[in-house]
């Protein structure tokens, strides 16, 4: 995946804040919804590595 695309998504979704939480509960850099994080076996959606891996 093109790293520029990943960076653009992170910038748009969380403004590079790994602890971002949206009003509807999306979490982390790529704003994973809890059900998505669970289905992808993400143990810590605020961990940048796990969040970006799941988001891509």
Image (cartoon, helix red, strand yellow):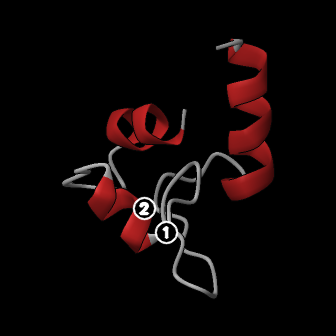
Camera-side residue: 2 or 28? 2
Side (left or right) of 37 relative to 42: right
Which residue lies at the image location 68% right of the left edge and 28% below the top edge?
6
Q: Are marks 1 and 2 in contact (CB under 8 Å)?
A: yes
How far across and how far down the image is residue 26, in percent?
Answer: 54, 71
Look at the picture and state if 29 lies above or below 20.
above
How far across and how far down the image is residue 33, in percent?
Answer: 49, 69
Camera-side residue: 36 or 46? 36
How far across and how far down the image is residue 5, in percent?
Answer: 77, 25
Residue wearing tag 2 = 36
Q: Number of numbered discs present?
A: 2
* Crowd rating for badge 2 (residues with CA inside 10 Å; few <14, some 14–19, many 20+): some
* Crowd rating for badge 1 (residues with CA inside 10 Å; few <14, some 14–19, many 20+): some
User: In terms of image quadrants, where is residue 39?
Assistant: bottom left
Report how far apart the C-alphas of labels 1 and 2 lie in the structure. Answer: 5 Å
How far across and how far down the image is residue 25, in percent?
Answer: 52, 81
Which label sits on residue 56? none
Quadrant of the rendering where the C terminus is positioned: top right
Residue wearing tag 1 = 33
Look at the picture and state if 44 lies above or below 11.
below
Q: Residue furthest bottom?
A: 23
Query: Element at badge 1?
Result: loop
Which residue lies at the image location 31% right of the left edge and 49% below the top edge?
40
Which residue lies at the image location 46% right of the left edge and 62% below the top edge?
19
């Amino acid at each position: 995946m093109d790293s520029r695309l990943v960076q653009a998504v992170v910038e748009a979704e969380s403004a590079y804040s790994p602890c971002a939480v949206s009003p509807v509960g999306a979490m982390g850099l790529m704003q994973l919804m809890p059900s998505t994080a669970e289905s992808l076996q993400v143990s810590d959606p605020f961990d940048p590595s796990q969040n970006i891996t799941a988001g891509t």
